[in-house]
Image (tube, grey):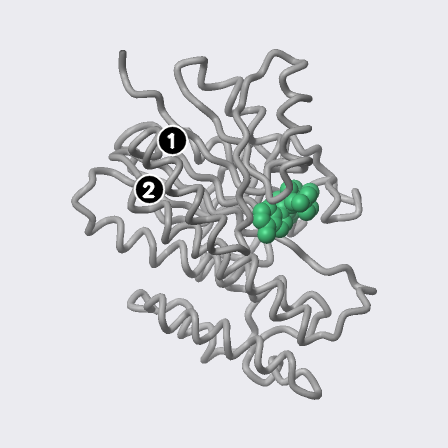
Amino acid sequence: MSTPRIFVVTGANKGIGLATVKALCEAVGSESIVYLTARSVERGTKAVEDLAKSGLKPRFHPLDVDDASSIETFATFLKKEYGGLDVLVNNAAIGYKEDAPEPYGVQAEHTVRVNYFGLQAVCNALFPLLRPHARVVNVSSSVGHLSWVNGEELRRQLADPALTVEQLDNIMRDFVKAAAAEKKQHVQLGWRDVQYAPYVASKVGVSALTRIQQRMLDQDPREDIVVNHCHPGYVKTDSTGNKGVFTAERGAVCPTYLALLPPNVASPRGEYVWHDKVVLDWVNADLPHPGY
Ligand SMILES: NC(=O)c1ccc[n+]([C@@H]2O[C@H](COP(=O)([O-])OP(=O)(O)OC[C@H]3O[C@@H](n4cnc5c(N)ncnc54)[C@H](OP(=O)(O)O)[C@@H]3O)[C@@H](O)[C@H]2O)c1
């Protein structure tokens, strides 16, 4: 019997993550195992039970991307049970609403911690388990495109093909520090003056990180491991107050496509992919209109 292919989706109890699990279960057949992970055992188990009613059989495992011990427990479990991993969809994220009462500095620290550092922590724990031809999808956003950064020097740093993870971490920490300061000093660093700047910074970080990750994986002895970042579209989910233009199923189209890229695909590799599967230059492209 051949080793089953193992798929993992983070933040998958609802929204685009749940729809991605559903699409993957429908696409891959019973010889593969799809893990629906969620930070809440109750919400995750309920989602798995609901999918079972349609004949789909994902498995559940708890995973809080904001909790180092939860990440380590999951990595240990995958290694022991399967010895590796074939597909990772980093979907989990948070965003504060416009009228959120929390101080801006708290919002900035929390958002960057979960969306950027949490995703990175999951990658650090699970990348050693990736098997040859593995596929990783980092769910970014339209606002994760470099054109959402105003400052020329900040854009230059983020676009630098020699940017390191350490330098990018520092850019994220500097954003958080500046956003927490009086008069929102992050704008002087080159970030946009919008209420949801923490979400923008976290997603720009995810996208910049993806480019570095692909560079590192290209040097890896394991064959053909590909990581891409995508904008799933403006999707009706809790995170948008159900104001999007797409269903969650439509939002899952691009992440699912990237998760299932065939072996030795020439492109996309380390690229920014729009919801309609079109590759956009992360540094130089103008975003399509409308920008979602
Ligand atoms: N919807 C859009 O228009 C849109 C546009 C661009 C990008 N995106 C991106 O698409 C992805 C999915 O968004 P969505 O719209 O489906 O949002 P959503 O419905 O709010 O779902 C977000 C998911 O992330 C989970 N999550 C939050 N913090 C977590 C943590 N610490 N550990 C594990 N899971 C955690 C949530 O779990 P709980 O239920 O426990 O909170 C939930 O399952 C996100 O990366 C988002 O930024 C969405």
Image disc number at residue 261: 1
Q: Is residue 222 above or below residue 290?
A: above
Q: Residues within 10 Å of mark 1 (few under 14, many from 20)?
A: some
Element class at badge 2 = strand
Residue 82 makes an appearance in the image:
yes
Question: Which one is nearer the viewer's eye here, 33 or 165?
Answer: 33
Amino acid bearing label 1? Leu
The disc placed on residue 106 is none
Q: Residue at x 77, y 59 (%)?
A: 97
Marked residue nearer the N-terminal end (1 or 2): 2
Say which quarter of the image contains residue 159. Answer: bottom left
Specify the farthest residue to the left. Answer: 221
Whether pointer 1 and pointer 2 mark residues with C-beta atoms closer than 8 Å, the reply is: yes
**Amino acid bearing label 2:** Val
Judge whether residue 234 can be spotted in this image: no
Please give the name of the residue rendered at 73% of the width and 41% of the height, measured from the top-left corner.
237
Residue that label 2 marks: 226
Image location (x, y in percent) of residue 204: 52, 62
- Residue 194 spot, x, y in % from top left: 70, 70
User: Which residue corresponds to the image point at 35% horizontal and 29% vertical from the top-left?
Assistant: 81
Residue 184 in picture, x, y percent from top left:
67, 82
- Please tell me whether mark 1 sits on a helix, a strand or a loop: loop
Whole-number angstrom distance, CA of label 1 to CA of label 2: 9 Å
Front-lying residue, 205 or 61: 61
- Viewer-side residue, 275 vs 56: 56
